[in-house]
Every structure is written in C-alpha cells, then in structure tokens.
Image (cartoon, grey):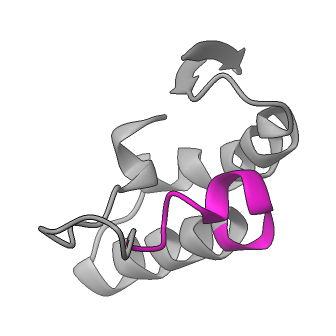
C-alpha cells in the first residue's frame, strides 16, 4: 500500500504506478460528499467517483469482481481513500 495526501486528505491505495492521476481526479469530487444533503445528491457524487475509477485501468481492476474467487465478492475501491 502507498499513501497519497492531497488537500490534507490521506488516500491509502495499492502500491502500483498510476494512482496519482486517479486520486487527483477523485479528490476534485470527493470533497463534495461533505456537502451533499440528500440521498440522491450523495448517490450522484458516488457515481461520479466510480466513473473516475472506471476510467483508469489501475483502479478499474478493483471495481470489477474477480471471477477466480469462489465467493465472488467485489473488492471495493471505496475501502481506500
């Protein structure tokens, strides 16, 4: 794992190249979660974050289920950040 700090927010992500760009884009949207007031608004922000993670191959792999795992659990990128 590696730690990346942007705007005094600590992101802990896998130690792979390419995360800096993902985090820079995600940080622009992440701070909006502090200000959302309705469930619909918060869900829209979460969907924006997911779209950012899907755009980058380094993070996309953590949003897709691993077909090799017997329990078919989804490793969520939201456990980081």
60, above or below 65, in the image: above
Q: Residue furthest bottom?
A: 40
The picture places residue 58, in percent across and down from the top left corner, at 73, 51
Please tell me which residue lies in front, 64 or 51.
Answer: 64
Residue beneath the point at 68% across and 17% down: 4
Q: Quadrant of residue 8?
A: top right
Position of residue 59 in the picture relative to residue 35 (left or right): right
The part of the chain drawn in magenta is 54-65
Is residue 23 shown in magenta? no
x, y percentage for residue 46? 45, 69
Please identify the quadrant where the N terminus is shown.
top right
Residue 55 inside the magenta-drawn segment? yes
- Residue 17 position (above or below residue 32): above
Left or right of 39: which side holds 43? right
- Callout count: 0
Tell me if 32 is positioned left or right of 7 in this view: left
Which of 66 and 63 lies nearest the eye of the viewer?
66
Residue at 34% in and 41% down = 79
Give the image location of residue 16, x and y in percent.
74, 30
In front of the other: 75 or 12: 75
> Residue, x 41% and y 46% (percent of image)?
34
Q: Position of residue 60 (x, y in %)?
A: 64, 65
Q: Residue furthest left?
A: 71
Res 5 → quadrant: top right
Residue at (27, 77) in percent of width and height: 38
Q: Can residue 48 be spotted in the picture?
A: yes
């Amino acid at each position: 794992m590696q730690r990346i700090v942007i705007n005094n927010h600590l992101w802990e992500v896998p130690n792979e190249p390419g995360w800096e760009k993902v985090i820079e884009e995600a940080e622009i949207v992440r701070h909006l979660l502090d200000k959302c007031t309705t469930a619909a608004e918060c869900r829209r922000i979460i969907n924006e974050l997911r779209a950012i993670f899907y755009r980058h191959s380094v993070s996309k792999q953590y949003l897709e289920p691993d077909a090799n795992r017997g329990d078919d659990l989804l490793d969520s990128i939201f456990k980081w950040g």
